[in-house]
Amino acid sequence: MFDTTQLEALDVAFSVLGRFHLEAPDEETLAAFWELLDEWPLPGTAGATTGLELMRTARAAGEDAATIRADHARLYGHTAVARVAPYESVHRGKERLLFDEHTLQVRDTYRSLSLQAPRLNREPDDHLGLELDFLAQSCARALDALEQGSEPDAARYVRLGADFLRDHLLPWAPDMLERAVAAAGTRFMAGLAHLSLGALETYAEFTGVPQVA
C-alpha cells in the first residue's frame, strides 16, 4: 500500500518547484508562498534544510518579486545568455543543443500521461520546471487511482515517475541545481535550487531509485 500522505506531499512540492523554475512568482504568489513557507511538505533532507533557511532569509531581507524575476531571467537566460541553462538537452546532448534526442524522449514520456509542453515546438520540452511538474503529475495520477481503488494503476503511475527520475532528471538536474546555487544573485533562487535538490532526494528514496553519485 502506498503512503498517500507522502504522495500528496511530493505532488504539492514538485508542483510549486516546477512552477517557480519555469517562471518567477509575482507579488501575490510570492506573498502566499511566504505565508506557507514553514509548512513546506518535504523537510528532512540537507537540501530542504538549507533551502528553507535561505528562503526565510530572503523573506526577512525583503526580496521582492521584481528582484527575484530579474535574477530568474539572468540565471535561466530569458533576457540574455543563460548562466545556467535549465534544459536537459544542453547538459546531456553531445552537441549541447536544444531540441535534441533527449528533448524528444522527454516529449514521448509526457505523452504517457497525455501531457505536452505548453509551447510545443517553440520552447524545448525538457525544461527543468516541466520535468519536475511531470513528477508532480505522476503523483497526482497515482493518488487519483488510489481513490478509485486501483492500486495497480497507482503503481504504474509511480513507476512512470520513478523511471523518469532515473532516466532524465538524476543524470543532469543535481549538477545543474548546484550550479544555480553558485550563480544565484538572490537567496530565493539559491533556496529554490536547494529545495529542488532535497525534493529529488526524497523522491528517489520514496521510489527506490539509486541516486547518481
Image (cartoon, rainbow, N blue to C red):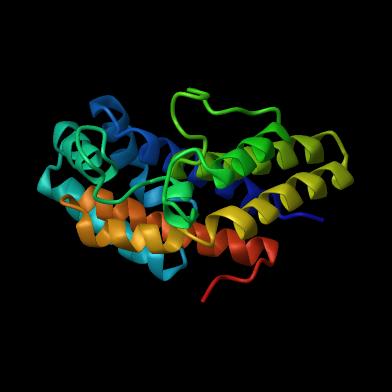
Q: Position of residue 65 (x, y in %)?
A: 20, 33
Say which of 95 and 92 sits in front.
95
Could one spot residue 104 in this view of the protein? yes
Q: Quadrant of the N terminus?
A: bottom right
Residue located 84% across and 42% down the image:
153
Whether residue 211 sits left or right of residue 32 in the image: it is: right
Q: Position of residue 198 (x, y in %)?
A: 45, 62
Total labels drawn: 0
Residue located 30% across and 61% down the image:
179
Residue located 15% across and 51% down the image:
185
Quarter of the figure with residue 138: top right
Q: Position of residue 94 (x, y in %)?
A: 48, 56
Q: Is residue 204 above or below residue 163?
A: below
Whether residue 116 sits left or right of residue 52 in the image: it is: right
Could one spot residue 140 in this view of the protein? no
Q: Is residue 50 above or below residue 144?
A: below
Q: Is residue 27 above or below residue 15?
A: above
Quarter of the figure with residue 27: top left
Whether residue 112 sits left or right of residue 56 in the image: it is: right
Residue located 87% across and 39% down the image:
149
Give the farthest residue toward the left.
61
Say which of 19 and 148 sits in front.
19
Q: Position of residue 167 (x, y in %)?
A: 63, 57
Say which of 210 and 107 sits in front.
107
Quarter of the figure with residue 23: top left
Give the farthest residue toward the bottom.
213
